[in-house]
Image: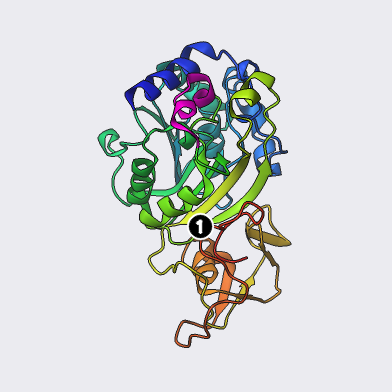
Amino acid sequence: MNNIIENVKEYYGKQLKSSSDLKTGACCPDEVPPKEIGVILPLIAEEIRDKFYGCGSPLPPMLEGMTVLDLGCGTGRDVYIASKLVGESGRAIGVDMTTEQIEIAKKYQKEQSKSFGHKDSNVKFLQGYIEDLESLGIEDNSVDVVISNCVINLSPAKDRVFQEIYRVLKPGGELYFSDVFADRRIPEALASDPVLRGECLGGAMYVEDFRRLMASCGWLDFRYTSVRNLELNNEEIEEKIGFVNFSSRTVRAFKLDDLEDICEDFGQVAYYDGSISGHPHFFDLDDHHRFFTGQPMLVCGNSASMVSGTRYGKAFKIIGNRDVHYGVFGGCAPAGGGDEAAGGGACC
């Protein structure tokens, strides 16, 4: 475990000078960021953007006034975006173990605060391990949203990472992260290879083990908001690990105590009112739940809780409760998805 951690520090602290040094496209986003994020990116210092290593854009909406925690923040790109989105009444916290990365992040605090028009900085960077947030003083039930961008795959102790996330999230809080996943378990000899690990391949989570891990940590249901297949585009690396199919996925999960491990039918109906900023016509809970403004949607008990027992509840009206049970919600599969094609979550 210690060897893996030190190899990752070496790779991101000394070997990589910018994102152009990456050997594959696994740690690179391949999608246009949402408009509300796109307008903030030009305000971020160039050095921070040049040293960004991520595979998605895991910043959910409705962050005003929230406390957001970024695990494996690197040079702080997503932390600073969150800083702008939460506003002066919110906070953005970044955690990273790599000295060279965290030093760059801290260097721009005053500059970024000024560019966002904030009177005082609402950002805090902590050097440490995402497997042990308690030692950094991050308390139980203290964070509204946890984000991470292509980092959890690097951890040799993912169970501890997800346990810590569950601990620090407030009830109803959201985990929203992007990462690299695999369609099978990676052999140990390849999982510990420094280059494969550093390129976000060696530690990629097997989707079924991820589902099991989430359930063991308290998340009986979670959802994929996006899934895209990855091309390695490196002949040498493909010769080593090309038998594995990799995908970049963005995951949404909530700390709710009434979720079940399959979707159950209680006859509930959800209405979205169009009030989430940037989403006037519809809101996507996941890759198969699009709520159109004003249009009723029959939902399972889990989905009803996800849009009513969280900060999104301000934008939703739920008709019905759990007094009467009608059996399994039609066409549902076990939480987390099960197969590579569908994407995930309990509702198919």
**What segment carries the magenta color?**
186-198
Q: Position of residue 342 (x, y in %)?
A: 65, 57
Q: Position of residue 247 (x, y in %)?
A: 63, 41
| Residue ID at (63%, 39%) | 245
Comparing 236 with 98, the one in front is: 236
**Please, is residue 159 above or below residue 343 in the view?**
above
| Residue ID at (65%, 47%) | 227
| Residue ID at (41%, 63%) | 256
| Residue ID at (37%, 57%) | 218
Q: Position of residue 8 (x, y in %)?
A: 44, 22
Residue found at the far bottom of this picture: 324
Residue 139 falls in image quadrant: top left
The secondary structure that dominates the magenta segment is helix
Q: Quadrant of the N terminus?
A: top left
Residue 40 falls in image quadrant: top right
**Please, is residue 15 above or below residue 313 in the view?**
above
Q: Position of residue 321 (x, y in %)?
A: 48, 82
Whether residue 65 is visible, yes or no, is no
